[in-house]
Image (spheres, rainbow, N blue to C red):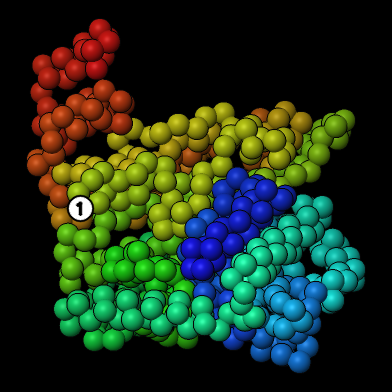
């Protein structure tokens, strides 16, 4: 039955991918799906999805129950919100919850979350000064009652977003996703002759709780601190964490972290908890199912109105820029307790950008020119691990996919002129950091655009571990070399381009200990240049010449 539940929620997630309108869901997999008991406890999550969505959504269903009330939970209902503090951290994430009834009895909930490409306001970016500027806020409410959709809500949504067909389409995709999950859940209950989920709930939660506590109990009773300095918006941000491993819990305290930022990079506590718990679970109990019971022993606290515990009405649109750095901050502390376990720092934050395209304003409006919002998901390199190299252009900790050029260009008059791996960007070490990417972005000749940058690691690249070297920093310029800001909306005239170099992951261990065959492989594949082979790994000109001759002769 446990395996069947996993297949139920995975089909639920795949249904969302197949029916979603936004490329962030359809191409990048920025979503989550799960099944819950009648008390709102998460029983199982889909394999597809992001930790920020899944672990934040683990807390969300209880808010829906509290707001709607059991007496008003009816068969055929569908509930919705994008409340950052009762959902998954910012207004662009739509969470939909559907009660599941079997033979007229309420047996549980299905829930899912997806990032929509636009929710109004200033548009997706860090520029807002409060939540009120960041878009349309939908409190927890009924999207449908007894299977009848609230048309007034649909009209309000359509009137407040730039891409109404796309956004409303995603709402229906989310509702359909839960409906698929509900059908498969009822199929399972019918097959196993279950009238409710009480026994399977007890089995799942008790076993997951016991297994997690056993893992924690086997760890040394110890305390350690970790920290990280990152770019922030207009000034750097300090992330600080203290870990306390006790017999039956791990406390993760962010006291000392920077206060609220004036711009939209603040993080609601639910999102901080999501990524702190994810980091600890990956390191300590990765194979134990992710549910309410296995998450409970990881306790996360942070001062109110710190940048990792922002409260209303703080701007939070780019909460992921800070939130994705939390695992590496936690690992800075955990490495002091459990050495040779966690990776070196990686790019952390996704290298996303949003392009708001419009017809040129310097000439008469060109025929056929259109407005469009294009959101592109991209990744830098992940950090090297204690026994192997980091992954290139791979998102850790979010796990979302890099969007294909073809899919991005299909959504609007945007042109991706360049997209390739960035040699020498991975930090040197016994194990090399993953490579970042080069990208070059422009628009068709009839369009100008606003480029909303959402980058970090410009001034503070990923740090190596155990003697490994730092990864390369982020670089963002115009086509003429003019430097651009790492965050914020910036105008690009017709014919202009944005040139991007995404950061690399850091290295692990002393580079003098790197296997010579791995150095030769990296050189042959173009992951490192001859200059880095000499400066970081000590190769001489004769060795390098031999490798290039072998490539030329088809021998390597």
Q: Is residue 417 above or below residue 86?
A: above
Instruction: Give the quadrant of residue 189.
Output: bottom right
Q: How many marks?
A: 1
Camera-side residue of 388 and 93: 388
Measuring from the top left, give residue 544's x and y in whole percent: 17, 20
- Residue name at image x 84 percent, y 61 percent: 158
Q: Is residue 263 above or below residue 295?
A: above
- Residue name at image x 45 percent, y 79 percent: 203
Camera-side residue of 546 and 49: 49
Measuring from the top left, give residue 518's x and y in whole percent: 19, 33
Q: Is residue 427 above or below residue 54?
A: above
Instruction: Give the quadrant of residue 148.
Output: bottom right
Camera-side residue of 64 and 384: 64
Measuring from the top left, give residue 193's x and y in whole percent: 62, 74
Residue tagged 1: 386
Instruction: Give the quadrant of residue 155.
Output: bottom right
Q: Is residue 232 above or below residue 500?
A: below
Q: Is residue 295 visible?
A: yes
- Residue name at image x 29 percent, y 65 percent: 283
Relative to 127, 159 lies left or right: right
- Residue name at image x 15 percent, y 50 percent: 509
């Amino acid at each position: 039955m446990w395996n069947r539940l996993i297949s139920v929620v995975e089909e639920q997630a795949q249904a969302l991918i197949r029916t979603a309108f936004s490329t962030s869901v359809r191409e990048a997999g920025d979503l989550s799906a799960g099944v819950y008991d009648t008390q709102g406890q998460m029983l199982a999550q889909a394999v597809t999805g992001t930790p920020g969505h899944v672990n934040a959504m683990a807390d969300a269903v209880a808010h829906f129950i509290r707001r709607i009330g059991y007496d008003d939970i009816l068969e055929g209902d569908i509930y919705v919100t994008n409340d950052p503090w009762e959902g998954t951290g910012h207004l662009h994430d739509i969470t939909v919850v559907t009660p599941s009834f079997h033979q007229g009895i309420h047996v549980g909930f299905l829930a899912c979350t997806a990032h929509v490409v636009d929710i109004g306001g200033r548009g997706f970016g860090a520029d807002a000064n409060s939540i009120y500027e960041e878009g349309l806020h939908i409190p927890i409410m009924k999207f449908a009652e007894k299977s009848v959709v609230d048309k007034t809500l649909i009209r309000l949504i359509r009137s407040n977003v730039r891409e109404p067909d796309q956004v409303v389409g995603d709402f229906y995709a989310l509702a359909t996703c839960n409906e698929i999950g509900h059908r498969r859940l009822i199929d399972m209950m019918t097959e196993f002759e279950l009238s409710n989920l009480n026994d399977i709930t007890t089995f799942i939660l008790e076993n997951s709780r016991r297994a997690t506590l056993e893992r924690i109990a086997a760890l040394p009773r110890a305390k350690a601190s970790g920290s990280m300095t990152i770019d922030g918006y207009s000034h750097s941000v300090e992330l600080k964490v203290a870990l306390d491993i006790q017999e039956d819990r791990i406390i993760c305290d962010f006291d000392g972290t920077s206060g609220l930022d004036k711009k939209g990079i603040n993080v609601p506590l639910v999102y901080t908890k999501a990524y702190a718990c994810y980091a600890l679970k990956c390191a300590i109990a990765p194979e134990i199912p992710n549910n309410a019971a296995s998450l409970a022993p990881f306790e996360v606290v942070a001062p109110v109105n710190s940048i990792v515990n922002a409260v209303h009405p703080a701007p939070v649109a780019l909460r992921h820029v800070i939130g994705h750095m939390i695992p590496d901050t936690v690992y800075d502390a955990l490495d002091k307790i459990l050495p040779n376990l966690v990776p070196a720092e990686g790019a952390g934050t996704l290298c996303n950008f949003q392009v708001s395209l419009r017809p040129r304003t310097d000439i008469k409006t060109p025929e056929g020119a259109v407005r469009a919002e294009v959101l592109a998901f991209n990744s830098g390199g992940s950090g090297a691990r204690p026994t192997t190299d980091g992954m290139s252009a791979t998102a850790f900790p979010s796990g979302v996919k890099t969007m294909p050029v073809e899919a991005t260009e299909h959504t609007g008059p945007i042109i991706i002129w360049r997209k390739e791996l960035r040699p020498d960007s991975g930090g040197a070490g016994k194990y090399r950091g993953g490579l970042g990417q080069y990208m070059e972005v422009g628009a068709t000749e009839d369009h100008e655009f606003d480029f909303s940058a959402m980058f970090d690691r410009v001034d503070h690249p990923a740090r190596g571990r155990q003697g490994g070297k730092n990864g390369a920093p982020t670089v963002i310029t115009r086509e003429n070399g003019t430097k651009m800001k790492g965050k914020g909306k910036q105008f690009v005239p017709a014919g202009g381009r944005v040139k991007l170099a995404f950061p690399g992951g850091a290295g692990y261990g002393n580079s003098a200990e790197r296997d010579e065959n791995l150095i030769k492989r990296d050189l042959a594949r173009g992951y490192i240049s001859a200059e880095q082979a000499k400066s970081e790994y000590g190769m001489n000109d004769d060795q390098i010449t031999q490798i290039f001759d072998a490539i030329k002769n088809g021998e390597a």
